[in-house]
Every structure is written in C-alpha cells, then in structure tokens.
C-alpha cells in the first residue's frame, strides 16, 4: 500500500477530506525519536544500532558499518488477530 492509498483509505473511513487525512498521517510520522503506539495496530520504537563489522556477501570482504538509528515494530493484538 502506498502513502496515497493509505491517505485515501483514511479519508474514506473517517469522513475527512484527503488533505485532512494526509495531515493526520504526517502528524504521526512527525513524531521522530519517540515511541508511537497505535492501539490495536502496534508500536513503533526508535532504537540505536551500534557500529559493527558486516560482510559483503558478493566479495566476502569485511566492511565497517557505522552506528545508526532505526525503528522496530511490534504488532498489536488487533493486527495479529486480523492476520491469523
């Protein structure tokens, strides 16, 4: 699902116009660096990934991977039950 499709789905289900739905979605993604919890859907938690050594699978050469920030997603019970 693309962002445009998600905005359309939000607008259709909530009765908002497309611009309001886009603003609502952008408000969620603007919470950079904090945990975002959507009850029934899941949690997005920011984590720091330490630097380390990785291996190029094609050549076998080792490369240094710099430290970075990433996000972990833990699905909620509503999403789990919808998938099963």
Image (cartoon, rainbow, N blue to C red):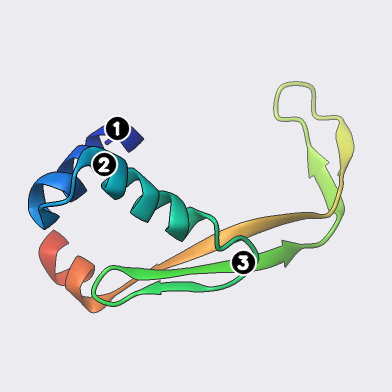
Mark 2: secondary structure: helix
Q: Quadrant of residue 17?
A: top left
Q: Is residue 45 left or right of residue 52?
A: left
Image: 76 above or below 15? below
At 15% from the left edge and 60% from the top edge, which residue is drawn?
83
Residue 67 in sight from this viewpoint: yes
Which label was assigned to residue 51? Answer: none
- In the rendered image, the quadrant that contains the C terminus is bottom left
Is there a contact, CB below 8 Å, between mark 3 and mark 1? no
Q: Residues within 10 Å of mark 1 (few under 14, many from 20)?
A: few
Mark 1: secondary structure: helix
Q: Residues within 10 Å of mark 3 (few under 14, many from 20)?
A: some
Q: Quadrant of residue 7?
A: top left
Q: Which residue is mark 3?
A: 46
At 9% from the left edge and 53% from the top edge, which residue is drawn?
13
Which label was assigned to residue 7? Answer: 2
- Distance from label 3 to label 1 (Cα)? 25 Å
Q: Which residue is mark 1?
A: 4
> Depth-wise, is mark 2 or mark 3 nearer the camera?
2
Mark 3: secondary structure: strand
Image: 27 above or below 54? below
Q: In the image shown, does 34 or 47 lie closer to the viewer?
A: 34
Looking at the picture, how far across and down is residue 82, in whole percent?
A: 12, 64
């Amino acid at each position: 699902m693309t962002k445009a499709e998600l905005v359309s789905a939000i607008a259709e289900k909530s009765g908002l116009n497309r611009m309001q739905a886009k603003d609502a979605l952008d408000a969620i993604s603007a919470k950079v660096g904090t945990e975002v919890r959507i009850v029934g859907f899941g949690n997005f938690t920011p984590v720091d990934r330490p630097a380390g050594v990785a291996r190029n699978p094609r050549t076998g050469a080792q490369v240094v991977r710099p430290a970075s920030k990433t996000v972990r997603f833990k699905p909620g019970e509503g999403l789990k039950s919808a998938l099963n």
